[in-house]
Structures are given as C-alpha cells and as structure tokens.
Amino acid sequence: MAAPPPAPGTGSRPRVLNLGGGDRGIAIPAYYAGFEQVLVDIDPAVKPDLLIDGRELGRLEPGQADAVYCSHNLEHYHAHEVPTVLEGIMHVLKPDGFADIRVPDMGQLMAEVVRRGLDIEDVIYTAGVGPVRVRDVIYGYGPQIARSGADHYAHRTGFTEKSLAKALVLAGFGYVLRRPGRVLELSVLAFRAVPTEAQKRLLNLRRPINLLLR
C-alpha cells in the first residue's frame, strides 16, 4: 500500500483544507484570511497541494486541519460514498476543528419548482456563469460538463437540510449550524461539540442554533 501523502506546510497558522476547491482563483470565505489554505483536488490541472480523491482522506495525516472547506463538492459523490467522505473529513480535523459545507438545497429547489410550476429545462436563476436550469441544480452545470468532458463535474446525489444533518451526525459531528447561503444553497458548519469561543468570534456565531435539536 502506498504511503499517505504528507501534510504540506509546517507553519504555525491554522490550516484549512479546501476540498475539491478547483481553481485557486475561486475565493473562499474571508474568515479564512489568516489560515494556511491547502488545496485538495483530484484534477492535476489545477495543481493542488494534495492530489487525492475526497474518498481517500483517511489516508492523510490525522488531526492536521483546523477546518475543512467543502463547497459544492459533496454532491459529486454517490450517496453510498458520502459517509466515507465525511468520515475522512472527521479524520483530518483536529478534535476542535470544524467542517464548512455547502451543497445545493434540494428541499428549497423542489419547493421552488412546485411554487413556480417549473419544468426541468426551465431557468430557475441566473448566475455569473449564465442561466442555471433546474436540471443543472440537480445533475450538475450542463455547459461545464459538456465543455470539459469531465464527468466528475456531474452531481451524483443531493441533500436537504434534514438529510445532510443526519449524514453529519452519523459521521460523528454533534453540533450542526445552518448559515445563510447563496441562491438554492444549503450552507452548514459542523462541529464535534459546541463551538469554542474563538470559533464563535471567527465565524460570527452570535446565537447559534443546533439543527440536531430541531
């Protein structure tokens, strides 16, 4: 068996693993400004710091990250693979680390499709890349998949607030907070336990509500 990839960097700054972040030009949230960012991706063309599949995070050095930023990556795995990815995220996090996860909100999408009487081919909103159809939210952005020829851009599963919270608690997270996201986006922060005071300040958590208590 091959040795696990080493953890890059030896600095004293907190570390965030950007899982499936792709292009380094894509900004991550401003609260990571003081962090060492480690790009983790399967595409060698983006020159990641760690060239590894998200399903193989368990091969990495454990407890190396203060945070894992996973923006619009989790939906690209099959449903039966999601627990492996989440367990890998838990593996690389320090005991008080947190996961910052964003995925398309399938619950909100379904409600909006019904409310507006939309067809799967209808445009549901317009983003910087252009019109986004219902089909794109469910299956992945069609023009990007067609242009790249890379099927890893396709979506293989989806989440509602309830299903994502359940997946996170089964992976070992005991405290899950929902935050405002972009259009049709489900954005959560997941911790093993109650966030520390430093994390509350960093993430501006004034009155956090644990989704697992709803």
Image (tube, rainbow, N blue to C red):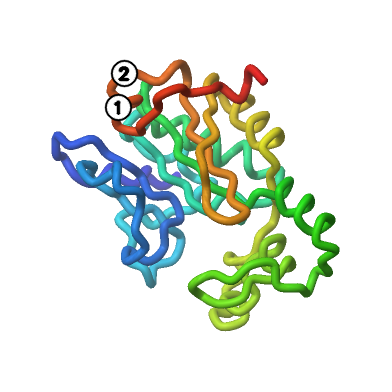
| Amino acid type assigned to the residue bearing label 1 in the image | Arg
Left or right: where does residue 83 sit relative to residue 117? Answer: left
Quadrant into which the N terminus falls: top left
Under circle 2, the secondary element is helix
> Going 37% across and 43% down the picture, which residue do you hit?
4
Residue under pointer 2: 197
Left or right: where does residue 162 sit relative to residue 55? Answer: right
Is residue 182 positioned above or below 23 on the image? above
Q: Are marks 2 and 1 in contact (CB under 8 Å)?
A: yes
Q: Position of residue 98 (x, y in %)?
A: 41, 30
> Going 16% across and 40% down the picture, which residue do you hit?
10
Task: Using the rendered view, name the quadrant where residue 204 is placed.
Answer: top left
Is residue 7 positioned above or below 149 on the image? above
Quadrant into which the C terminus falls: top right
Viewer-nearest residue: 203 or 98: 203
Left or right: where does residue 119 sit relative to residue 205? Answer: right
Viewer-nearest residue: 121 or 69: 121
Q: Position of residue 124 (x, y in %)?
A: 69, 67
Q: Position of residue 118 (x, y in %)?
A: 82, 66
| Amino acid type assigned to the residue bearing label 2 in the image | Glu
Residue under pointer 1: 201
> Going 70% across and 36% down the picture, which residue do you hit?
163
Left or right: where does residue 5 sit relative to residue 124? Answer: left
Task: Using the rendered view, name the quadrant where residue 145 is placed.
Answer: bottom right
